[in-house]
Image: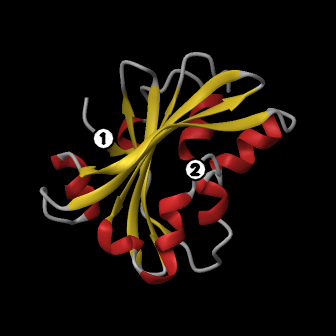
Amino acid sequence: MKWQPYPQLQYRIPSPALKQWLRDRGSLTERLLAKSSGDFRVELLQQGWGRASIDEARALQVPPRHRVMIREVTLHGQQQPWVYARSILPAKSLERSLRHLKRLGTKPLGALLFSDPHLQRSAIEVKRTPRGWGRRSVFHLQGQPLLVSEIFLPTFTP
């Protein structure tokens, strides 16, 4: 199944609670912090330079062979892996005032994104993956695009 706008797949999503999590346009980090009663952490799986998939490049509107930083993390709540997140940041997006994004480590990207009052977010797309239901959006931070995909893992109960 490919990524599709939320309205096209909303009737396939198995529960109303999961629908709320998938379509929410606010900070996922903030919601997970609240749900976990503060027992929340970010596990950095990998971060480095690579190439976006054709689908990711298309979403970001960059050439398919464009150099990007790929960041993959697992968001844990109450000692359980709840969300797998993959962020794609074009090299151009990491210049000048956004270069600090290269050194996030275990800091949540969402907290940083939603602290910017000028943040813009594209429509949410959803997809059923082997790991669970996911969503993705292109964010524009200081005019620069980055793609964030989040998969709700089977250990997450909405």
Looking at the rendered image, the quarter that the N terminus falls into is top left
Observer able to see residue 26: no
Relative height, residue 138 to residue 76 (above, below) = below
Query: Residue at the spot x=63%, y=63% of the render?
Result: 112
Q: In this orientation, which residue lies closer to the viewer: 73 or 140?
A: 73
Query: Residue at the spot x=20%, y=65% of the render?
Result: 62
Q: Quadrant of residue 88?
A: bottom left
Q: Locate residue 36, reporting x and y percent.
A: 80, 32
Name the residue beneath numbered marker 2. 105
Relative height, residue 153 to residue 99 (above, below) = above
Observer able to see residue 5: yes
Q: Quadrant of residue 40?
A: top right
Tags 1 and 2 in contact by the CB under 8 Å rule? Answer: no
Q: In this orientation, which residue lies closer to the viewer: 98 or 115?
A: 98
Task: Indicate left or right for 149 with 106 as reference.
Answer: left
Name the residue beneath numbered marker 1. 3
Query: Residue at the spot x=37%, y=72% of the render?
Result: 93
Q: Locate residue 58, reporting x and y percent.
A: 20, 57
Looking at the rendered structure, the kind of residue marked 2 is Gly
Relative height, residue 110 to residue 101 (above, below) = above
Looking at the rendered structure, the kind of residue marked 1 is Trp
